[in-house]
């Protein structure tokens, strides 16, 4: 029997990371809006954070879209004695 | 959201004399660390582009590197934002009646304590080191009478001015509430 790992698992893990990321960010923003004393820096930094997040997320999506995620990696190919994970 | 004109348990004639956070140098350090952690892997990628481009083009290694890079930079961004929020939520409010010390120890750990001006025995300002002297920031230590309670204003701007303002407020408070 050939055991194979679909590459989509990696994509699923990334989506899970994004979900936790968004939840954690929402909690931080909630704490900030609840307890902070309003100052000029607050809306500025909040906007900067959201714009930075959108930029980084977009860049990640663009980069990830260039790969074929239907690839399945046979485990045996990774366990071969001469297999090299990082090709040179 | 907290408003300086509506403090918790505010007395009728109480007003805010000082509202303090740590000096902007603290934010500059967060920015410098963020810049360093962003620039280092990008610089390595540029210097070793021949090798990195081969890895990125590999059908198996490429996706791992792409996801890793995405996670790294997103996490870094969140870490910087979180550090700024910690800085922003740590505040000291000095009114003509009391000092309120609010410290955000972690996201769900917030300590708010207050001290009446009448119970303060000693106020000390401390500026140490080249950067603190150059940028005029430092610590203010507030010692109460009797119990061993001590407030620390860490890395605030103009610590001498803060100390003098608090001492003046204590004198004014003594006149309003003479000892019996």
Image (cartoon, rainbow, N blue to C red):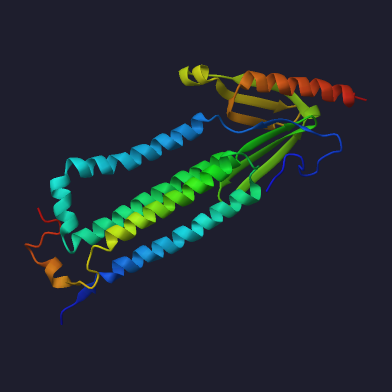
Q: Is residue A41 above or below residue A86?
A: above
Nearest to the observer: residue B127 or residue A8: A8
**Residue drawn at 83 percent across, 25 percent down:** B173
Q: Nearer the viewer, residue B115 or A52?
A: A52
User: In the rendered image of this protein, does residue B34 appear above or below residue B133?
Assistant: below
User: Which residue is more in the foreground, B163 or B6?
Assistant: B6
Residue A87 in percent (x, y) is at 11, 56
Return the x and y of residue B122 as percentages of the image width and height: 71, 21
Residue with the most extreme left position:
A82
Q: Total label count? A: 0
Whole-percent x, y for residue A35 in the image = 65, 47
Which residue is depicted at the point 19% across and 63% down? B60
The answer to which quarter of the image holds residue B145 is: top right
Q: From what the image shows, is residue B81 above or below residue B93?
A: below
- Write the residue at 33% across / 60% down: A61
Answer left or right for B66 relative to B160: left
Image position of A71 (left or right of B87)? left
Q: Quadrant of the C terminus of chain B?
A: top right
Q: Position of residue B16 (x, y in %)?
A: 75, 33
Residue found at the very far bottom of the displayed protein: A1
């Amino acid at each position: 029997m050939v055991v194979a790992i679909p590459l989509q698992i990696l994509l699923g893990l990334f989506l899970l990371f994004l979900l936790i990321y968004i939840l954690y960010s929402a909690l931080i923003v909630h704490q900030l809006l609840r307890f902070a004393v309003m100052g000029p820096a607050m809306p500025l930094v909040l906007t900067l954070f959201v714009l930075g997040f959108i930029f980084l997320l977009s860049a990640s999506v663009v980069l990830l879209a260039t790969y074929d995620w239907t690839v399945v990696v046979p485990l045996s190919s990774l366990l071969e004695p001469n297999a090299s994970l990082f090709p040179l | 959201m907290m408003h300086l004109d509506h403090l918790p348990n505010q007395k009728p004639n109480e007003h805010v004399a000082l509202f303090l956070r740590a000096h902007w140098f603290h934010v500059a350090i967060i920015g410098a660390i963020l810049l360093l952690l962003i620039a280092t892997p990008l610089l390595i990628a540029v210097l070793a582009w021949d090798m990195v481009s081969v890895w990125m083009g590999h059908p198996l290694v490429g996706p791992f590197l792409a996801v890793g890079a995405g996670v790294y930079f997103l996490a870094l961004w969140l870490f910087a934002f979180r550090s700024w929020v910690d800085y922003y939520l740590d505040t000291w409010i000095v009114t003509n009646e009391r000092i309120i010390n609010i410290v955000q120890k972690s996201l769900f750990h917030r300590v708010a304590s207050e001290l009446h001006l009448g119970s303060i025995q000693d106020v000390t300002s401390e500026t140490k080191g080249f950067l603190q002297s150059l940028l005029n920031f430092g610590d203010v230590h507030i010692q109460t009478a009797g119990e061993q309670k001590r407030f620390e204003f860490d890395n605030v701007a103009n610590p001498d001015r803060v100390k003098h303002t608090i001492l003046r407020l204590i004198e004014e408070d003594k006149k309003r509430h003479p000892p019996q």
